[in-house]
């Protein structure tokens, strides 16, 4: 059965036309001041933003830490506590809390203020001492006045890097401020 040539042309044009129907999204210009309402309409807010200046937080900040070695394939990086003591820590994306060894806790003069029951990687629940540190710093990224647990392995946990998107590269870890 042969289709009329006009019908074949119409089908071909229709199929080709589908390739050109691509939804477009326009990126917001950094210096503009507007909002998009519920109906998708752009509302100009420039009269409200007359003194608009980019704050340091609108500039994407990236902090980097050199990977010193790997522990079971996991990056080990330098972490500074209380602006004074630098320790090697395992960057553990599965750890909820940062942990330091009892030897490092002694070096910091850490005083346990409580204990916390945690589930370790093996599934076992254990009780670990908790202390507070003035600061944890990695490559310029700082977390102040936070708790750390005392455990056998030094782990940099999510209480430190939860404000960052992490990129683990061959030689460095990048902390991208959200």
Image (cartoon, helix red, strand yellow):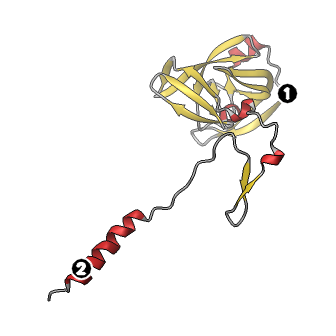
| Relative depth, front residue between 39 and 122 | 39
Position of residue 46 relative to residue 127, above or below, is below
| Relative depth, front residue between 121 and 148 | 148
| Circles 2, 1 touching at the beta carbon (< 8 Å) | no
| Place of residue 42 in the rendered image (x, y in percent of width and height, measured from the top left) | 69, 58
**How many marks do you count on the picture?**
2
Q: Quadrant of the C terminus?
A: top right
Determine the residue positioned at 74% across, 39% down. Answer: 117
Q: Residue furthest right?
A: 113
Q: Residue furthest bottom?
A: 1
| Relative depth, front residue between 170 and 35 | 35
Q: Quadrant of the N terminus?
A: bottom left
| Place of residue 43 in the rendered image (x, y in percent of width and height, measured from the top left) | 74, 57
Q: In the rendered image, which residue does mark 2 sit on? A: 8
Side of 93 where 56 appears, left or right: right
Determine the residue positioned at 20% across, 86% down. Answer: 4
Label 1's element?
loop
Q: Closer to the camera: disc 2 or disc 1?
A: 2
| Place of residue 145 in the rendered image (x, y in percent of width and height, measured from the top left) | 81, 26
Determine the residue positioned at 69% across, 31% down. Answer: 160
Position of residue 164 relative to residue 20, above or below, is above
Quarter of image, res 122: top right
Q: Earlier in the sequence, mark 2 or mark 1?
A: 2
Q: Which mark is residue 113?
A: 1
Disc 2/disc 1 C-alpha distance (Å): 80 Å
| Relative depth, front residue between 137 and 133 | 137
Q: Residues within 10 Å of mark 2 (few under 14, many from 20)?
A: few
């Amino acid at each position: 059965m042969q289709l009329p040539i006009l019908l074949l042309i119409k089908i071909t044009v229709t199929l080709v036309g589908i390739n050109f129907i691509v939804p477009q999204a326009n990126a917001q210009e950094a210096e503009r001041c507007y909002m998009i309402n519920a109906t998708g309409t752009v509302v100009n807010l420039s009269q409200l933003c007359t003194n608009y200046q980019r704050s340091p937080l609108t500039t994407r900040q990236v902090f980097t830490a050199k990977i010193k070695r790997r522990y079971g394939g996991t990056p080990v990086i330098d972490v500074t506590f209380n602006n004074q003591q630098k320790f090697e820590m395992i960057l553990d994306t599965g750890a909820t809390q940062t942990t330091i060894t009892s030897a490092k806790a002694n070096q910091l003069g850490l005083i346990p203020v409580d204990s916390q029951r945690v589930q370790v990687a093996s599934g076992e629940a254990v009780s670990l001492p908790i202390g507070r540190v003035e600061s944890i710093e990695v490559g310029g990224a700082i977390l102040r006045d936070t708790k750390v647990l005392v455990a056998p392995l030094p782990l940099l946990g999510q209480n430190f890097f939860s404000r960052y998107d992490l990129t683990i590269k061959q030689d460095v870890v990048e902390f991208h401020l959200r």
